[in-house]
Image (cartoon, grey):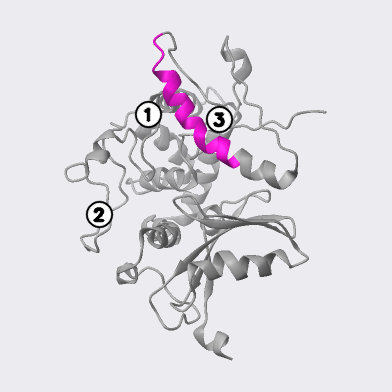
Amino acid sequence: MLAEKLGGMIYTFGSYRLGVNHKRANIDALCVAPRNIERQDYFGSFLELLKKQPEVTECRAVEEVLVPDVKMNLDGIKIDLLFARLALKEIPDNFDLCEDMLLKNLDPKLVRSLNRCRATDEILRLVPNIDNFRLALRSTKLWAKKHGIYSNSLGYFGGVSWAMLVARTCQLPNVVAATQVHKFFLVFSRWKWSHPVFLKRPDTVNLGFQVWDPRVNVQGRFHLMPIITPAYPHSTRKVMLNEFSRGMQITDEIMLGKAGWDKLFEAPSFFFKYRYIIVLLVTSNNTDDLLEWCELVESKIRYLIQNLERILHINLAHVNPKCFEQQE
């Protein structure tokens, strides 16, 4: 059959590919197709085919974003499936996405989709001990979620950014699993955040895509914590730096035997910390509309924080990433 000859592949990335996912986590994946498959095919006929599958629910396309994808629930597992069309006639089995020249002549949306997989694989290649890395990353992600600073869309760091920070710590000499997390807080509580976090020197391959370089890209000069994602509100940056410092203090105590590891993962009482709380209520007439409406509102919250920062009498606007379902 022609379809079998042309081929195509599904690649995973993010937490699942790194081996640090938990059972309730989404699976991030990328569908790679040959050149005769267009974007409109993926978000058109392919999407409709998915919706007809009995095991698929909550299936919808999210196209008007930097990295378009299809979101669905497959047998109770939430999946975000990206799409990339390569300028190749066929996609063979076990095709390697690491070759830079694959990006040549591709549009930026396709490159961003491909780079999700490429970045994940690169992280695994650049850490000297994958088991130590995974243990440290699991611990760091749990800490970040407990302390309410894990959310890319709300201006904090997302999964890839946390993985890069931990991987950078793993590259330091004489770092073993027992001291990995302590090293993490030691490094990033003191990091000069105007300086980017690199796992290796940037590639010199010039394919015409925008890269982080404040010397040639003016926007890069305004990136507060340049790792992967830019333009964090000042307040979320302040919250994160405070948490890094607090994490450093706690892990110092742990290393000295004055506290146990459970102290690091104690969730602070968010609603007892501040005198004034703003609550955003998101409602809809049906479940499908509510999912899309929630995503749209969430994507705009960082702009609300930026506007609150401009008010003279507000010292800190701390957004809580946790979403609460309204009780009947």
Check residue 243 in the rendering and tell me which mark sits there, or answer none.
Answer: none
Q: Label 2: how many residues lie within 10 Å, few (<14), some (14-19) or many (20+)?
A: few
Instruction: Name the element at disc 3.
Output: loop
Label 1 close to label 2 by CB (< 8 Å): no
Residue depicted at 50% across the width and 22% down the height = 318
Give the Cα distance between marks 3 and 1: 17 Å
Res 252 visible: no
Residue 5 at x, y percent in the picture = 52, 88
Q: Vertically, is 180 above or below 120?
A: above
State left or right for residue 223 relative to residue 309. left
Q: Earlier in the sequence, mark 1 or mark 2?
A: 1
Q: Earlier in the sequence, mark 3 or mark 2?
A: 3
Q: Amino acid at mark 2?
A: Pro
Q: Quadrant of the N terminus?
A: bottom right
The one of 102 and 263 positioned closer to us in this rendering = 102
Instruction: Name the element at disc 1.
Output: loop
Q: Which residue is mark 3?
A: 148
Q: Nearer the viewer, mark 3 or mark 1?
A: 3
Q: Label 3: how many residues lie within 10 Å, few (<14), some (14-19) or many (20+)?
A: many
Q: Which residue is mark 1?
A: 189
Instruction: Name the element at disc 2.
Output: loop
Residue 153 at x, y percent in the picture = 50, 39
Q: Is residue 102 rendered magenta in the image?
A: no
Give the Cα distance between marks 1 and 2: 24 Å
Give the Cα distance between marks 3 and 2: 31 Å
Residue depicted at 62% across the width and 65% down the height = 47
Q: Which residue is mark 2?
A: 202
